[in-house]
Amino acid sequence: MKFSHLLLSISLLAIATSCSFASSGNLDPEPRFEARAWLESNPNPYAFAGNRFASTEEALAFVNMLYEAGASEVYVTGIYDEEWRIDAEGGPYADTLIIHLPLNTESRKILFEISNEEAVSEGFLPEKDTGQEELLLWWD
C-alpha cells in the first residue's frame, strides 16, 4: 500500500508542476538507485520508460549522456517491482530519473536544456535554474 501511495504522490507532483520537477533541496522519492547500476543489472529488456526509450540499452545511453553533461549522480525511482511484472517482463520497470545537479554553471545549463527538452516534448513547462540540487524527469 505504501508503494502505491508513493507512486501516486510522484505522479501528482510531476503532473502539477512539470516533467522536470525542481526543488531547493533533495527530492525524496524512495527507493532510489544509481541509474547505471540499476539499468545494467536489470534483466528486463524494456526496463525504463517504455513510452520514451525503445530498450534498456537506449535508456542507459540517455543516463550516460546525463553523466557526460556533468550530472553528479543520476538515480532511478518510480520502480514497479511487482512479482507478476518480474515474472512476465524479466525484471522490474521504472519511469522516473532524478538528476543530482553539479555546481558548475555550464554543466547545469546543459542539464537543464536536456531536461527541458524532455519536459516540453511531454507537454510540460520548462524548468528554470533557481539553485536547486536535483531535477526529476518522469515519463508517463
Image (cartoon, grey):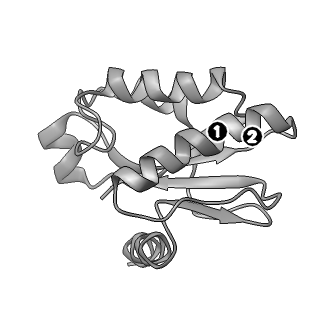
Q: Are marks 2 and 1 in contact (CB under 8 Å)?
A: yes
Of 37 and 112, which appears nearest the observer? 112
Of 30 and 71, which appears nearest the observer? 71
Position above or below: 28 against 110: below
Assign a secondary structure to mark 2: helix
Asked whether residue 10 is in view, the answer is yes
Q: Can you identify the residue that label 1 sits on?
A: 111
Question: How many C-alpha atoms fall within 10 Å of the one at disc 2: few (<14), some, or many (≥20)?
Answer: many
Position above or below: 30 against 121: below
Q: Quadrant of residue 88?
A: top left
Q: Quadrant of residue 39?
A: top left
Position above or below: 85 against 73: below
Of 52 and 28, which appears nearest the observer? 52
Question: Quick check: 69 left or right of 58?
Answer: right
Q: Residue at x 59, y 41 (%)?
A: 113
Q: Can you identify the residue that label 2 sits on?
A: 108
Q: Residue at x 30, y 59 (%)?
A: 140
